[in-house]
Amino acid sequence: MRLGIIVAALAAAFAAVLTVLPSMADTTLIPRNVIFGNPERTAPQLSPDGKWIAFLAPKNGVLNVWVAPAGDFAQAKPVTDEKERPIREYYWSRASDFILYLQDKGGNENFLLFAADPKSGMVRNLTPYDNTRVIPLVFSVRHPDEILVGLNNRDPKWHDAWWIDVRTGKTRLVYKNEAGYGQLIADDDFHVRYGLLDQPDGGFAVKRIAADGTASDYTTIPGDDSLTTGIVGFDTAGKILYGFDSRGRDKAALVSFDLASAKPTVLGESDKADVGAVIADPVSGKVLGYGANYLKNTWTAIDPSIKADIDFLNAHATGDWSVASQSDDGKSWLVLHDPVTEPAYYWLYDRAHHTLTKLFTIRPKLEGAPLSAMYPVVIKSRDGLDLVSYLTLPRGSDANGDGKPDAGALPMVLYVHGGPWARDDYGYNPTHQWLANRGYAVLSVNYRGSTGFGKGFTNAGDRQWGRKMHDDLIDAVQWAVASGIAQGDKVAIMGGSYGGYATLAGVTMTPTTFACGVDIVGPSNLQTLLSTIPPYWASFFENFARRVGDPRTEEGKALLRERSPLTYADKIVRPLLIGQGANDPRVKRAEADQIVAAMKSRHIPVTYVLYPDEGHGFAEPANRTSFYAVSEAFLSQCLGGRFEPVGDDFHGSSIQVLEGGDHVPGLMTAMAAPH
C-alpha cells in the first residue's frame, strides 16, 4: 500500500489510536524528551586521587563536564563551556588536575583533544590541527602530567604517536608511522613497542618495534580471527601484554602474551561467549577480573582481591552492573547499575566497608514511569545457528511474565543493531522502552556477523549482507509470529547504520515482509559506501573486502551491486522513512540521496529527513527527539500504535524535510511552526 493512499485514513486523533491497543489504555505515555533528551547527569568518573567526581550534565542545553568534590556532590560546577555539540568522551588527567575531552564539529568525527582546568576554568585545544582525528593512546601512571595520542595530521590514513604535556600544551613527535600501522601499542613510558599491519586476508601482522624504530615479526592474527583477537595493552610496568585471543579456539579468551615468543597464556574464558571486558587495577594495570556476555553479562575474578566485591555487587544488583571508574587507592568504585525496569543509576561503592551510596539517577524523570521488562531469548536460524535476541513487550501486556502478550499478538518493530560487527545487549534500551510504551513488541536480534559469540558466528556473516544475515532477521520475525508475539502483517523494521542497511534491504529485497521501514544513516549502495570510507579506515579496508565484498575485482563489484538495496529500489511497495546527517563521514549523505532519487524517479513515495549539523547518528538532543517524533507518527500509520503529538520536539532542531513531509501526520504543520 502506498503512503499517499493511506495518509488521509491515518489522521485520527490520538485518543482514537488507543482503541487499537486496549491493553495500553491505562499506561502512561512517556514523553519522548524524557527518553531521548539530555540526561540530567551521566558518565561520572572519579579523579585518580579520589577527591573529585566529574560527570556530564547539560549547561544551557548542551552536555558539558561538571566537577564536584567527592564528598559534596551538591557543590558541582561546570568546567567546560561547549555551546553546540555535546561532549561525549572525556578523561581525568592522571595527576587529577585537568579534564581532557574530545570534540568534533557537526558530526564530522574529526575529534580534537581539549584540556580544561577545573580551578581556573581555562580550556586549551591541545591538538589545534585541521582535518585531524585524535586517538588517545596512553594515560601514564608513571608520567601523570603527560599523555600519548595518535594524530593523523601528517597523513589522514595513518596516526603518528605524539607526546603532549597537559599542563603546558607542549607536543613532541614520538613515532612517525610511515609503515602504515593501523594500531600502535605503547607502554607507560610512551615507547611505541608494537604495531599492527593490515594483511590481504583481512588479518594483521603484529610487528615488534625497537627503540630505534626498526621492526621485526612478533605474531600474526589470521583473517578468521581479525574481529575476535587483538592486543589491549601493557600493565604499568610494561612487562605484561594483555589481549583477547580466538586463535586455535572459537570463543575469544582473555590472555597475556609472552613478550619474547608471543605465546598466549589464558587468564579467563567462557564456553558461551567471547571475553570482552576487564576490571584492572588503575595503578599497576594488572587485570583483576573479566566479563563475558552471552544472554547477560557475568563477571569473574582472576585476582582474589576482587572476588568479594563481585559477589557483593551480584547480590545487590537487580540488573546488570559494571565498574565505571576507580580511585587509585582502590578504596572507591563508581558502579553503574541498570535494573532495566527502573532508570539506571550510579553507586559509589566503598570496598573496605562493602557499602553502596547512590550517587545519582541518569534520568530521574523516568522514576515511576511504566518501563518494560526485557526478555533474552534464543532463536534458531533456518540453518541451526543460535540467535541471541532481546524482546520487550508493552507494560501490562504480559501479566504473567512469560514473554508473550496475554491478549494475543501485537504489532512489532524489529530493531536492528548497527556495525554490523557489534551486538545487542541486555539492559535498559531507550528505543525499546519508547516503542513498547507506544504499544509495540520490540525485537532485537544478534544476527550472524554480530560479535561476542565466537569467531565462527561472526565469520558466518562474511559476504552475507542482504543474504544469510538478512535471513536471520526474517527467521526471527517468523519466530515472533509463530510464537503469538507479533502480528504477521504489522511488523516494521528499523535501525541505524548497518541497521539502516537492513531496513533498506527489508523493503527492497523482501518487499512485502515488513509493513514499513525506518532507516537511519543506512547505506543503500555498497559500491559507493566502500569507495567513500574515511581515510583513517584504510587499515581496515581488507576486512571490508573480505566481509562485505571486494570493490577492486569484477566479481566483487558484481557482488556489491547484487547486495545493494539501491539495485532493487523499484521493488519498494511499503512506506519508508529515511533520516540522514549531512556531515556523516562513514555513510555519506549520497547513500540516502541515491535511493530517494531512485524512488522519486519511479514515483514511489518516501519521507526523507536531513540534519545539516549531524553526522553518523543524531547527537544533538533536539535533533534526536525531532526525528523520533517523526518516526513515532510514521509508525502509527502502518502499525496502529499510539503517538505523542510533536509539541515542542522540533524546537532547537535543524530538521529539514526534503521529501514526503505530507506522508506523516502533523509533520508539515510542525515544520511550519517556528523552531
Image (cartoon, rainbow, N blue to C red):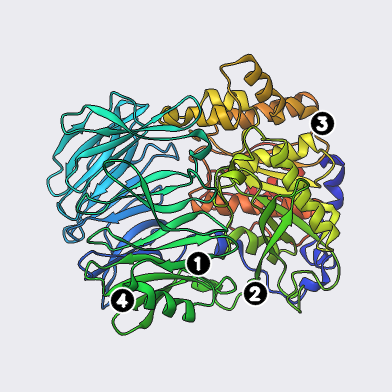
Disc number placed over residue 370 in the picture, else none:
2
Give the foreground label among 1 and 3.
1
Disc number placed over residue 172 in the picture, else none:
none
Q: Are marks 4 and 1 in contact (CB under 8 Å)?
A: no
| Residue, disc 4 | 74
User: How many marks can you see?
Assistant: 4
Bin the neighbour count of mark 1 within 10 Å (Cα to Cα): few under 14, some 14-19, many 20 and up: some
| Residue found 40% across the figure and 70% down from its top | 335
Q: Does dot 3 land on a helix, a strand or a loop?
A: helix
- Image check: 572 left or right of 244? right
Question: How far is disc 1 from disc 3 in space, using C-alphas?
Answer: 45 Å
Bin the neighbour count of mark 3 within 10 Å (Cα to Cα): few under 14, some 14-19, many 20 and up: some
Disc number placed over residue 571 in the picture, else none:
3
| Residue, disc 1 | 298
Q: Does dot 2 land on a helix, a strand or a loop?
A: loop
Which quadrant, please, contains the N terminus?
Answer: top right
Q: Does dot 4 land on a helix, a strand or a loop?
A: helix
Above or below — where is 670 with respect to 299? Answer: above
Q: Is residue 625 visible?
A: yes
Quarter holding residue 47: bottom left
Q: Earlier in the sequence, mark 2 or mark 4?
A: 4
